[in-house]
């Protein structure tokens, strides 16, 4: 792995960690308030996705070029997020039947982290002009 790839993955990890913190905070508040697990997961994941798109686009993959490119990125990002969202809801629901909810969510989140890296790098933000990373 090159130095540039390690730095890029570190940035991915940082943005993803911020998203996870946001996701868990919203999820915990909603679950503590009596929100059903699937609804809490949906709301928390959608909130974190907004942060992730901006952070990945600007800080991790440092996309440059025209704003017109954002349309394709947004569509690919939404497809990826919807697939992961559906899988994560099913996973949280299934696992929460046999273990504590917090553990079910942790296993689900951990198992999607690495898969998302490859999806973002090779599907969502692929083949686009790069500029020096911002922020």
Image (cartoon, rainbow, N blue to C red):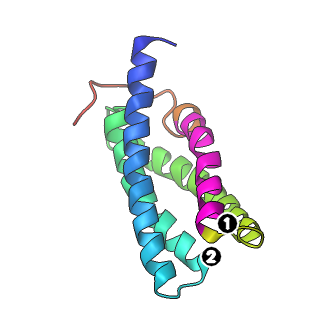
Q: Position of residue 104 (x, y in %)?
A: 66, 63
Rendered image quadrant of residue 108: bottom right
Give residue 59's quadrant in the image.
top left
Residue drawn 59% across the image and 38% down it: 114
The answer to whether residue 133 is seen in the rendering is yes
Q: In this view, does 15 lie above or below 9?
A: below
Which one is earlier in the sequence, the residue at label 2 or at label 1? Answer: 2
**Screen quadrant of the C terminus:** top left
**Number of numbered discs on residues:** 2
Q: Find out whether residue 96 is within the magenta segment.
A: no
Task: Nearest to the eye among marks 2 and 1: give it.
Answer: 1
- Residue 99 in the figure: left or right of residue 114: right
Q: State the image coordinates of residue 42 (x, y, percent, origin top left).
A: 55, 71
> How many residues crowd mark 1 within 10 Å: few (<14), some (14–19), many (20+)?
many
Label for residue 38? 2
Q: In this view, does 134 lie to the left or right of 111?
A: left
Residue 70 seen anywhere in this rendered image of the structure: no
Q: In this view, does 104 lie to the left or right of 133?
A: right
Question: Which stretch appears magenta?
Answer: 102-120
Q: Residue at x 67, y 63 (%)?
A: 86
**Dots 2, 1 in contact, CB < 8 A:** yes
Q: Which of 100 and 33 is in front in this view?
A: 100
Determine whether the residue tagged by mark 2 lies in a helix, strand or loop: helix
Identify the disc placed on residue 92.
1
- Image location of residue 9, percent across then percent down: 45, 29
Q: Residue at x 64, y 54 (%)?
A: 107
On whether residue 104 falls in the magenta region, the answer is yes
Q: Which quarter of the figure has residue 88? A: bottom right
Q: What label does residue 132 carry, if any?
A: none
Query: What is the distance, in whole Å, between disc 2 and disc 1 at their CAs?
Result: 8 Å
């Amino acid at each position: 792995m090159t130095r540039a790839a390690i730095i890029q993955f570190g940035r991915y990890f940082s943005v993803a960690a911020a998203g996870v913190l946001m996701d868990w905070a919203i999820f915990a508040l909603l679950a503590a308030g009596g929100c059903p697990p699937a609804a809490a997961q949906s709301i928390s994941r959608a909130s974190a996705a907004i942060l992730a798109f901006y952070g990945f686009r600007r800080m991790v993959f440092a996309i440059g070029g025209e704003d017109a490119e954002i349309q394709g990125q947004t569509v690919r990002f939404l497809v990826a997020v919807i697939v992961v969202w559906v899988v994560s809801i099913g996973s949280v629901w299934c696992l929460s039947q046999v273990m504590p909810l917090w553990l079910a969510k942790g296993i689900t989140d951990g198992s999607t982290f690495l898969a998302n890296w490859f999806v973002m790098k090779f599907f969502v933000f692929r083949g686009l002009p790069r500029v020096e990373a911002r922020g």
